[in-house]
Amino acid sequence: MSRRTRTTIPTNVALLKPEVMDGVYGNIKRKRQQAKAAYDKHAKPLPELQEGEPVRLQPVNPKAPWEKGSCVAKVGPRSFLIETESGNLCRRNRSSAKSLPDAMADPPLNQATTMRQIRGSPQPKSTVVEAIVTSQPQQTVVTRSGKTSVRPSRLDDFVT
């Protein structure tokens, strides 16, 4: 790895002998430690899932919707056994199982009644007829900076 590659271009034989570079492995190790320290600065461990806690599972297909389920058991240090609503048992890493807030875990049974309650009873439509006001638009407008803005004469035919 520390030698020149052989080519068809004439090269001195002494230049083709390997020359060991000092500190390569130390530099690689130092760079890895710096990258780990930068990552760990803002990273935090995810909280544990409790048995029976409602979760959403990340699907294998990225375009598919996330599935609801509940945590059945802890299988490893970061993996959990999760039962989906369809009855399937899945083993997932903690990062692909997001815990649900309590409000989302139990949706209302009858959404039609709740929506009716939110909207209220239907209001009768008012039959007030608005009077059409036809007045000449203001020709000059003074802007905030004090400049007088005059409407172009070519727009006189249009009614606003």
Image (tube, rainbow, N blue to C red):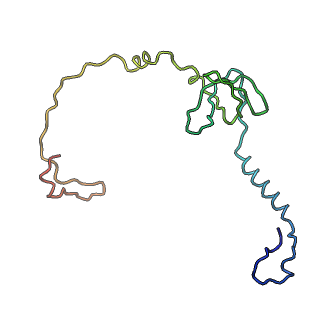
* 56 left or right, relative to 143: right
State which quadrant residue 30 falls in.
Answer: bottom right
**Number of numbered discs on residues:** 0
* 128 left or right, relative to 90: left
Q: Position of residue 37 (x, y in %)?
A: 76, 50
Question: Eyeballing the image, is 45 above or below 75?
Answer: below
- Residue ID at (12%, 43%): 135
* 41 left or right, relative to 99: right
Front residue of 135 and 13: 13
- Residue ID at (64%, 32%): 98
The outermost residue toward the front is 8
Question: Eyeballing the image, is 72 above or below 12?
Answer: above
- Residue ID at (87%, 68%): 22
Front residue of 8 and 44: 8
State which quadrant residue 72 falls in.
Answer: top right
* 90 left or right, relative to 19: left
State which quadrant residue 142 falls in.
Answer: bottom left
Front residue of 118 and 112: 112
Q: Position of residue 79 (x, y in %)?
A: 74, 32
Q: Classify the position of the N terminus by image quarter.
A: bottom right
- Residue ID at (73%, 29%): 80
Q: Position of residue 14 (x, y in %)?
A: 87, 81
